[in-house]
Amino acid sequence: MKTVTVVGARPQFIKAAMVSQILRSTPNQEEVLIHTDQHYDKNMSNVFFQELDVPQPNYHLGVGSHTHGVQTGRMLEAIENVLLKEKPDWVLVYGDTNSTLAGAIAAVKLHIPVAHVEAGLRSFNRQMPEEINRVLTDHASDVLFAPTQAAIENLHREGISEEKIYLVGDVMYDAALHYGAKAQQTTHILEQLNLSPQGYILTTIHRAENTDNPVPLKAIFTGLAAIAEKLPVVLPLHPRTRHTLERNGLLETAQQHLHLIEPVGYLDMVMLEKNAGLIVTDSGGVQKEAFFHQVPCVTLRAETEWIELVELGWNHLIRPTDADAVRSGLLNAIALPHPSTIPTHLYGGGQAAKKIVDILTKRR
């Protein structure tokens, strides 16, 4: 069985690593890996493959950063050329990026079955490009691998056939279990940054809704600067976020108050997450990683795909309307005691990747 896997951004590298390990260790399985180069910074791309023990991609498409239409269109054309050459049995896509949508459309148009990992997630905010990507990909896919029961219920409400849907758990949880111990043994990021466990806030900001709009951008970074007076704020700065801060005249202030660092590799990020006193993010994946490492999280958005973490008290939503909302929300989160409920079954038992490969093999 030949599977073409399409990835292009950091969270997809991590998810694909777990499934790739199973595919490559199973007899009569061949995987062809396409990297769209949606994330083209070395620390956000190549280093992940090295650390995760994933072979370098068979194809680098070199698409890079563009507007949504240009980026998706160029990916679609390039992926189609690869699929025509490779003629796979399956095309496997992950998550909600433009790479996900382009891979799904290219395959569907060529009548190649599509499998979507992390299917059924919904923020119910159609202003988010990620929401459009995930909805369209789900409806184009032949097999949908849902991480939670809530995701399955979303798919049912949209009329997707029951026979296409599988509850497999979350491959990100597989990764947290697999790589957590390795990070503990190999990374020295805390010493390098002179950080003490639980003595800092870890932050990631990259969503278009927060970086493309000057109002939430200023609110977030002004609020973070105020909090940094009480607890150091460490921010691995996404290249896109750096550019928007500079464009809006906020970079110098951020540099004065926050501990800005270059994007880090996966194992360093795991160690920073495991030892943070609080994680502040607008990322979907980092919300879950915070829970996996039992660290409270604040999500700077009006909604989340992982509503179960809000209900359990591990995640708190703050809409970044102004700096006071961000500052007060973070202060409240710091003051709250850690939740006592840690349901280990929530995202599966760490066997999601194996279940995915087994199902693809049986459905070939």
Image (cartoon, grey):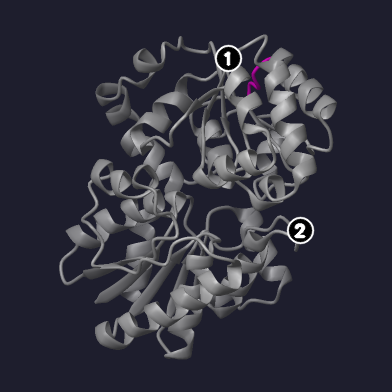
Residue range in magenta is 337-341
Please state which of residues 303 and 65 is positioned toward the viewer in this rendering: 65
For label 2, the residue is 125
Residue placed at 24% from the left, 77% from the top?
Answer: 1
* Residue 149 higher or lower than 338, as above or below: below
Question: Whole-percent x and y of residue 247?
Answer: 65, 44
Question: Whole-percent x and y of residue 256?
Answer: 60, 19
Q: Quadrant of residue 181?
A: top left
Direction from residue 23 to residue 200 in the image, left or right: right
Packing grade of label 2 (10 A; few <14, some 14-19, many >=20) is some
Please state which of residues 98 and 175 is positioned toward the viewer in this rendering: 98
Is residue 296 visible in the rendered structure shown here? no
**Amino acid beneath label 2:** Asn
Tell me the tag on residue 232. 1
- In magenta segment, residue 338: yes
Question: Whole-percent x and y of residue 208?
Answer: 66, 52
Is residue 234 visible in the rendered structure shown here? yes
Q: Quadrant of the C terminus?
A: bottom left
Residue placed at 42% from the left, 90% from the top?
Answer: 110
**Amino acid beneath label 1:** Pro
